[in-house]
Amino acid sequence: MVNTMKSNVNKTIIEELNTSHSLPREKWHTLLSSFTEEDRIYAASLARRVADEIYGNDVYIRGIVEFSNTCNRNCYYCGLRAGNTKLERYRLSPDDIYSCCEDGYRYGFRTFVLQSGEDPYYTTEMICDLVRRLKKGYPECAVTLSIGEKSFEDYAAFKEAGADRYLLRHETANEAHYGKLHPENMSWKNRMRCLDDLKSLGYQTGCGVMIGSPEQTIDCLVDDMLYMQDFKPEMIGLGPFLPHSDTPFRDKPKGSYEMTLFLISLCRLMLPHVLLPATTALGTIRPNGREQGILAGANVIMPNLSPVRVRDKYMLYDNKICTGDTSSECRGCLERRMEAIGYKIVIARGDYNG
Ligand code: 5AD
Ligand code: SF4
Ligand code: FES
């Protein structure tokens, strides 16, 4: 009885989000602290309807080249942190990176995502040269960068060179919580400054959160939803926190699979046009996690284009999927997985269309 009443309240809140695309703090709090399995399924059905209206049964693919696992930061959650001395580090040359994208183009990728740790070896000029070369070789493709916190001038230079999009998860919109996930030399205010700069420079900008990171509370997630409601990112990356055995968070519990799916649905209802990937972390926590992500309202999949020889070295968390598979194997695998749930991978840049 009590549960049914709660569910009716939550159902009404989900419907309000679907029509007004925003909620006040108290309603976010109610929804995130008391949702039931029934609420989650209801939100997924509305979210999928919204995604179907805007994107049909198309799923966009982005090829990620994880070009360096070297990082001078020390985020407590991440396997690439500088303090992890067990990890063998690698750097791909610009020619190697370009050749991964050439393969990707042949497999039907029209967005290349260049991602790395924060690695000062790659200068602004090197990144700009690579972006220019890719945009010249593949003028119909989008280039996305995901290389961390930089200055306004650097972001402007990458944009000028032709970069279209930038991914920088905010990790948490709660400053005190940010301080529990990162060492003192990292600042939440600078992260927010970066996101504002990216947006003001005209990038399609992606932020995002790990669900269930250590010490994350419902209030933190409420702060995340309110932040995104206001910032209106073009892209949102959501995945469960997964521990990595060579980090300070090795013994912390995983994030919740159900909470991740629920938040994916709520993001779709809040920002109907948002580009929302079913992430690798979601596919790692459950064998069919990415399919369930699509069915909860996601519309993007981001497989790896990195050479197999380096794949198992880009280990953000334990047991990451696809580390033994080639780009072509992942491409075929995803085609089948999407078809099995009634969706299809399209050969397109897949820009934000809001
Ligand atoms: N579990 C889940 N996601 C992680 N990331 C880093 N480490 C982990 C982990 N242990 C995510 C962060 C980062 C992105 C590249 O990967 O959100 O921004
Ligand atoms: Fe480096 Fe990014 Fe990992 Fe932090 S999350 S340690 S910045 S690769
Ligand atoms: Fe990589 Fe299935 S997507 S093997």
Image (spheres, grey):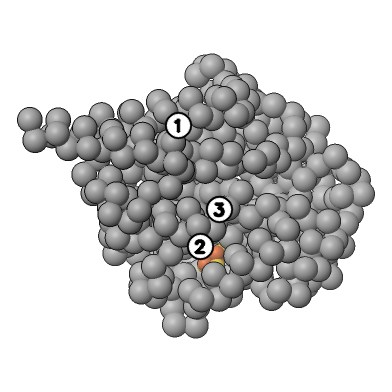
Q: Which mark is first along the chain, 3 or 1?
A: 1
Which residue is found at the position 75% from the left and 72% from the top? Answer: 154
Nearest the camera: 213 or 66? 213
- Left or right, 98 with respect to 256, comes to right
| Residue wearing tag 1 | 47
How packed mark 2 is, by other alpha carbons closer than 10 Å (few <14, some 14-19, many 20 or more), is many
| Spot occupied by residue 163 in the image (x, y as percentages of width and height) | 78, 56
* Mark 2 or 3: the one toward you: 3
- Left or right, 108 with respect to 272, comes to right
Figure quadrant of the N terminus: top left
Instruction: Answer whether labels 2 and 3 touch (C-beta < 8 Å).
Output: no
Farthest residue, direction front:
20
Q: Is residue 134 above or below residue 297?
A: below
| Amino acid type at image mark 3 | Lys
Q: Total number of numbered labels? A: 3
| Residue wearing tag 2 | 170
Q: Which mark is residue 232?
A: 3
Label 1 lies in ligand 1 vicinity (Cβ under 8 Å): no
How packed mark 1 is, by other alpha carbons closer than 10 Å (few <14, some 14-19, many 20 or more), is many
Q: Is residue 100 visible?
A: no
Q: Is residue 192 visible?
A: yes
Q: Secondary structure at mark 2?
A: loop
Which residue is found at the position 71% from the left and 56% from the top? Answer: 203
Quarter assignment of residue 329 = top right
Nearest the camera: 123 or 1? 1
Which residue is found at the position 67% from the left and 72% from the top? Answer: 150
Q: Which mark is first along the chain, 3 or 2?
A: 2
| Amino acid type at image mark 2 | His
| Spot occupied by residue 120 in the image (x, y as percentages of width and height) | 69, 74
